[in-house]
Amino acid sequence: MAAPTASGLSRQVRCFSTSVVRPFAKLVRPPVQVYGIEGRYATALYSAASKQKKLEQVEKELLRMAQLLKEPKVATSILNPYVKRSIKVKSLNDISAKERFSPLTSNLINLLAENGRLSNTQGIISAFSTIMSVHRGEVPCTVTTASPLDQAALSELTTVLKSFLSQGQVLKLEVKTDPSIMGGMIVRIGEKYVDMSAKSKIQKLSRALRETL
């Protein structure tokens, strides 16, 4: 059976969104737009879960599903393109029953199986997590340093980064180490990117010297 066309996909997503939230009809817009097939399914799920006030529950269930799909036995039976869809649907129904997934999550998984879209599952989960992160007001921030920061430096850095946030926003900080940057740090917060690494400064100096020679 061929994968659904773009127009067919849109109808299926709308059907999924409305079928689980009747008698409500209006789509709840997510706080951020996520594009592509994964974004469409994630947006429909967000709308449905929001209307049923089950956003956190669905997010938890999806993260659990993501864990299960990493297990070799589950991945082999669910993601193998040579396994019949009817068998996949039964396996997924068994998983949903065992994990006690809500109808929202179960319906989504079954729809993906029936439409041959299970390969998009991880992408949909990632898209939904992105929407939920913005929903909670989280601002992702990644700081890369050449060597680990001590507690005092990390605390001071966190305070400085939080000063750039608006009211209601929450800093979601991830600190990484990369000896190749040689010193300093690289900061990515939201859509802003600042490279203050020693490596970057050396490269700029090298380019400036070449231009003067």
Image (cartoon, grey):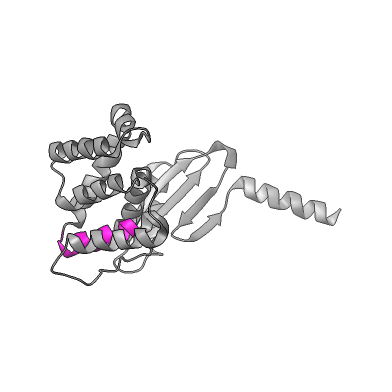
The answer to whether residue 4 is left or right of residue 94 is right
Can the viewer see residue 182 in this picture? no
Residue 45 painted magenta:
yes
Quadrant assignment, res 37 = bottom left
The answer to whether residue 70 is left or right of residue 36 is left
Q: Position of residue 32 (x, y in %)?
A: 36, 64
Residue placed most toward the observer, 210 or 31: 31
Q: Main secondary structure of the magenta part?
A: helix
8 is higher (above) or lower (below) than 114: below
Most extreme residue toward the right, as rendered? 213
Most extreme residue toward the top, as rendered? 73
Q: Position of residue 149 (x, y in %)?
A: 44, 42
Q: Quadrant of the N terminus?
A: top left
Most extreme residue toward the bottom, as rendered? 26
Quadrant assignment, res 171 = bottom left
Query: How many numbered marks, from 0 up?
Result: 0
User: Which segment did they paint magenta?
Assistant: 40-53
71 is higher (above) or lower (below) than 149: above
* Image point (48%, 54%), residue name: 188
Q: Position of residue 29 (x, y in %)?
A: 29, 69
Residue placed most toward the observer, 79 or 160: 79
Q: Position of residue 173 (x, y in %)?
A: 38, 50
Residue placed most toward the observer, 52 or 24: 24
Can the viewer see residue 51 in this picture? yes
Most extreme residue toward the front, as rendered? 1
Residue 112 painted magenta:
no
* Image point (29%, 27%), residue name: 73
The answer to whether residue 104 is left or right of residue 77 is left
